[in-house]
Image (cartoon, rainbow, N blue to C red):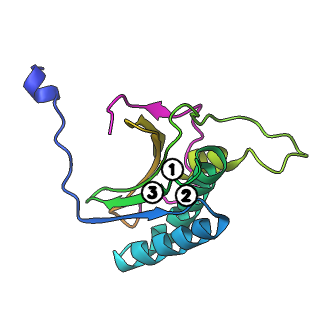
Amino acid sequence: MTAAEQISVPEPVLREDRLDYTPTARSVSLCRHRAARLVLQWGHPELAGDASLLVSELATNALLHGAIEDRLFRVHLTLTATTLRIAVSDARGERLPGLREAGDDECYGRGLLIVARLADRWGVEPRTVGKTVFAELALRQKPDMPMGPRELRAGPSRTATPR
């Protein structure tokens, strides 16, 4: 295989939405509802619930672990012919997410386990300032393709492309 054959061409974006939110608990609810509504409007009602939950978990993590005073976090939804990508960016690039086992008596610590369980792929991308945590849901083209729990992954995939 030649180097030219190894270069992947990105899929064309069919739909896209990007909105910045203030780092408050109310914003998590707003972006969750917006994601569900958009995914329904984009013609994928079977993904609306999963997309809503993924946005909620990633936005909550941005609020709890990535918030800096007077800095917004961004929710970016992208739909291609094969994938719905949910990306949440925050200003704290030094605080990278990681899977961990939460104790029975802990109130927090399960969000990324939920993301890893629901998403077909997830990971972290560094930015010039901050980071983006993303989750991708594959679009099922055939009615006989199973929907439901995906395999649990050990950790995020990391790409080195700065944004």
Q: Quadrant of the C terminus?
A: top left
Query: Does residue 47 appear to the left or right of 84 in the view shown?
Result: right
- The x, y position of residue 119, in whole percent, is 51, 50
- Residue type (three-letter) at the residue carrying disc 3: Arg
Secondary structure, mark 1, is: loop
Q: Residue at 48%, 74% (x, y): give it.
A: 34
- Residue type (three-letter) at the residue carrying disc 2: Leu
Is residue 90 a member of the stretch shown in magenta? no
Residue range (magenta): 144-163
Crowding at mark 3 (Cα within 10 Å: few <14, some 14-19, many 20+): many
* Residue placed under numbered mark 2 in the picture: 54
Q: Residue at 55%, 48% (x, y): give it.
A: 150
Mark with earlier residue (2, 1): 2
Residue at the extreme top of the image, as rendered? 2
* Residue placed under numbered mark 1 in the picture: 119
Q: Are marks 2 and 1 in contact (CB under 8 Å)?
A: yes
Q: Quadrant of the N terminus?
A: top left
